[in-house]
Structures are given as C-alpha cells and as structure tokens.
C-alpha cells in the first residue's frame, strides 16, 4: 500500500535531528549550569566582589556558605564529566565540524542583521545559522573560562600557573563573575529564542 502525500511529508518532518546522546548531555549540562549559578550566587554573597551588590537570597541555593559549596562542587563535577563526554562525542562523530564549521564574521553579521529584522529562517532545525553557531561556541568558551577561573580560585596553590594567568585569586573571582554574567545573558537569549521557535524545544526532547 502506498503512503499518502501527507503521511510522507509527516515522516519527513519527523526525521531525527538530535541524537540521544546530544539530548541527554544538553539537559545534564543545563541542570549543572543552573545549580552552579544558584549556588555560586550564594557563595558570592558570603564574600562579595562588589560590596554594594548582593544577589537576592531567594534565588540562591545552599542556604549557607557550606551548603552552597557542596552544591557547587557536585554540579561542577557533573558539568566537567558531561562536558568532556559531549566534546569527545561531538569531535569523534564529526558532529562538531558539521554543525559549527565553517564560521565567518561576515556570515555572523549578515545573520544577525536578518535576525534583528525578523527575517532569519528557522524552517530547517537540523541546520544552525551563523548566529547560532557563534552563540553555541561562545557558550563553550564561556564555560571553559568559568572552569579555569573556578579552579584558580579553588586550588590556587596546586595550580600556580593558572592562578598567575588569571592575575591572582581576587582577579580570578572577577573573571569568574563576569563569565557567569555573560553565561546568564546567553541563557536568557537562548530561552527567548526557544519561546519564539518552540519547535526547537521539541527537538531537544524528542530528537525529531
């Protein structure tokens, strides 16, 4: 029996876009980042970099400094190992090169202008436009800076070279805070874009 034209189109629209390992690692990373943000804000409040500013206690995690540190370190290891898994799988399967390369400044600017004019197409969710590529790569770089600056704060004696690269422990805290702020901004933009293109959320849940 032949399939109807609508059934064929339905199956074509339901093709696999996100493999299982991408979806699992994405949500685990999202969980780890959320836990690290909320607990990190509680840690910041215990010894603020900018004395005039503190995060509202209701949006922090841990209840007190010791509890916040436990949450922070637990989420850190989840982010570290899950991030290594994602990078290894992305490079090993060739997905990284297919999805994020090549990327040029001109393409990013052109797609950014198109996005601001609401003319950027999202018809093919299996393809990342230049702005998406740049944003995802920027998230990866920001997470790397967060990890390195966090290690410089946590183990300054054991990693003196990293500490010196960050200036010193105090400046590493500033770098950590700035990287965290950038990550929060990128996450907010990501959430807004998902709200504008809700089909993209389904691909991260069902893979299709």
Image: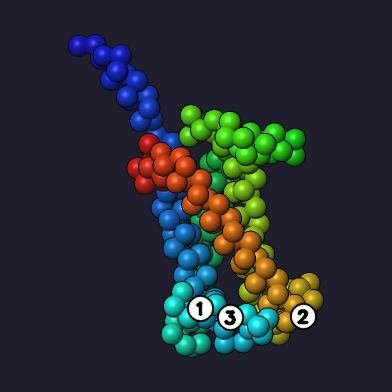
Label 1 vs label 3: CA separation?
A: 6 Å
Q: Earlier in the sequence, mark 3 or mark 2?
A: 3
Q: Position of residue 181 (x, y in %)?
A: 62, 66
Does residue 158 appear anywhere in the picture?
Answer: no
Q: Position of residue 157 (x, y in %)?
A: 71, 85
Residue drawn at x 41%, y 42% is 198
67 vs 119, left or right, is: left
Q: Does 29 sit above or below residue 119?
A: below
Q: Position of residue 55 (x, y in %)?
A: 55, 77
Does residue 33 appear anywhere in the picture?
Answer: yes
**Quadrant in the picture for the N terminus:** top left
172 vs 1, left or right, is: right
Residue drawn at x 30%, y 14% is 5
Element at badge 1? Answer: loop
Element at badge 2? Answer: loop
Element at badge 3? Answer: loop
Residue drawn at x 53%, y 56% is 188
- Dot 1 crowding, Cα within 10 Å, few <14, some 14–19, many 20+: few
The numbered mark at residue 54 is: 3
Q: Which residue is mark 1?
A: 56
Q: Does 147 sit above or below residue 124?
A: below
Between marks 1 and 2 in the image, the one whose residue lies nearer the viewer: 1
Label 3 vs label 2: CA separation?
A: 22 Å
Compare residues 69 and 24 and report the one nearer the observer: 69
């Amino acid at each position: 029996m032949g399939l109807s034209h609508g059934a064929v189109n339905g199956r074509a629209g339901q093709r696999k876009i996100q493999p299982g390992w991408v979806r699992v690692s994405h949500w685990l990373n999202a969980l780890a980042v959320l836990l690290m943000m909320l607990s990190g804000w509680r840690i910041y409040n215990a010894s603020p970099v900018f004395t005039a500013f503190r995060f509202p206690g209701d949006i922090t995690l841990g209840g007190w400094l010791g509890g916040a540190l436990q949450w922070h370190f637990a989420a850190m290891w989840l982010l570290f190992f899950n991030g290594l898994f994602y990078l290894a799988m992305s490079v090993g399967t060739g997905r990284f090169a297919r999805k994020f390369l090549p990327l040029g400044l001109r393409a990013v600017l052109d797609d950014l202008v198109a996005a601001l004019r609401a003319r950027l197409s999202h018809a093919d969710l299996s393809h990342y436009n230049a702005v998406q590529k740049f944003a995802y790569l920027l998230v990866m770089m920001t997470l790397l800076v967060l990890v390195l600056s966090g290690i410089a704060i946590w183990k300054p004696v054991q990693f003196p070279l990293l500490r010196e690269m960050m200036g010193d422990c105090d400046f590493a805290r500033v770098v950590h805070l700035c990287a965290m702020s950038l990550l929060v901004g990128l996450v907010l933009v990501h959430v807004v874009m998902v709200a504008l293109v809700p089909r993209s959320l389904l691909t991260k849940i069902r893979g299709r």
